[in-house]
Image (cartoon, rainbow, N blue to C red):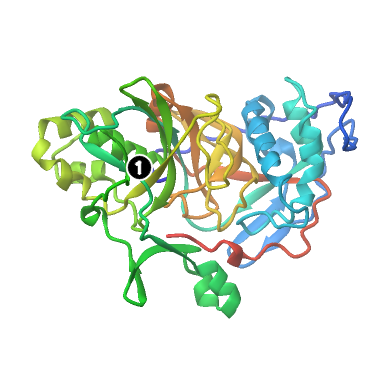
Amino acid sequence: MLARAALSLSLVITLAACASTRPAPIVTGGTKPLPKPPVTTPTTPTTPPVVIPPDFTLAPVGFEALPGWATSDVAPALTAFKRQCQSWQARAPDAPLSGGRYGGKVSDWLNACYAATTIQAGQERWFFEAYFEPQVVQGPGDAKLTSYFEPVIQASREWSPSFTEPLLKRPTDMITVDLGAFAEAYDNETLRGAPRTLNGKLSGDRIVPYPKRESITPYLGQIIGYAHPADVYNLQVQGSGRLHFQDGTEARAQFSAQNGYKWNSALGALRNSGRLTSPTWANFRSWLDLNPGQQKSTLNADPSYVFFQEETIPDYAAGPKGAANVPLTPMGSIAVDPAYHPYGAVVFVAGDYSGAPFQRLFVAQDTGGAIRRGPNRGDVFAGTGPEAGAFAERMNSAGPRWFTLLPKQFAPATPIASASSPPHG
């Protein structure tokens, strides 16, 4: 997923959190023994601080330190966590979590995963209090919260005057280089500070950067379909979307690859040039319609280009798969910087939305080029369709506070090194 807009003031209201005494749910059937959670939530954290010098620390706090915890809606986060657990349960228990500088092994999370399957509506807050301990996040980089969504756009299998911009599959000549693997193989600190992966193409016996947007030309068989240029660009910014074809069929344009260049908003470029004073998506679409001869040059202001793969939509209540390869949950999944937070991390973020407190629990299941800016930078997945899009367009919280919830009894004696997922570009 790529990045969205800029700035507003953060507003944080601290509310007292109430310890839950909800009894454990009764479990019947199944083959795996479920853990017995405590009757009450300890008020004193038992997990030792996770200190990862020099620029990133986690320190234990109580749930009462999380602004608005007692009244926040945590149900979507439980849905996202259950989906994450399905992915973990398919992996080896001793496998490390993907990305991040903390998180331990898959096995450290399985007790909570087994218990999550038994939780009923209304028990969600009790579950997180019973099985997790909060840690306050401190680290470098941007502190900002934005949002993205899954657009639903009209598309056509064939070119027409109304559908002129192609949606392209990942090119067959694109090569992905895993620099993280080379960093480990060569034990090289310089490589550890580079992006984890790079996309390029062969030029003779060398790998060179993949072309910018302006130099990408479709080849036979690469085109999924056509849509309005503003809609295609919106899909590329959001990272995926649903396609409603003229014959009534629907499909998902799922993120497949990106050419590697830093995202530069085409809407922002129009605004900076004075040609579009209010860079909303509706205004951008209208401007392109009024200036057909400038459509290509306008989009080419952004050298970044996203390729898709066409997929069926098995669950219309779930979003597209994020970078963690898990279907995203509306208002329950968040994109993070995987150089700091592992995929699957349970994070609580306290910021603001349109002048009101925005305090919610999420599961880290995605990332994006503009999100890889530090441990306090996040992008909330708002859901699918125009209502979610309206929310995402307005979400812009500066200076949010971040917390991460670690499983109880979790003791990361040796935290996962940052080299497992160095900062991306």
Q: Which residue is located at x 54 percent, y 71 percent?
A: 192
Quadrant of image for the N terminus: top left
Disc 1 designates what residue? 236
Pick the front one: 223 or 162: 223
Q: Which residue is located at x 78 percent, y 63 percent?
A: 413
Quadrant of image for the C terminus: bottom left
Q: Is residue 244 left or right of residue 54?
A: left
- Note whether residue 7 is visible: no
Quadrant of residue 159 within the rendered picture: top left
Residue 81: x, y in percent? 67, 37
- In the displayed structure, would residue 301 be above or below residue 417? above
Q: Which residue is located at x 34 percent, y 28 percent?
A: 153
Pick the front one: 83 or 41: 83
Pick the front one: 122 or 205: 205
Q: Residue furthest front?
A: 220
Q: Is residue 207 left or right of residue 228?
A: right
Residue 108: x, y in percent? 78, 50
Residue 319: x, y in percent? 51, 32
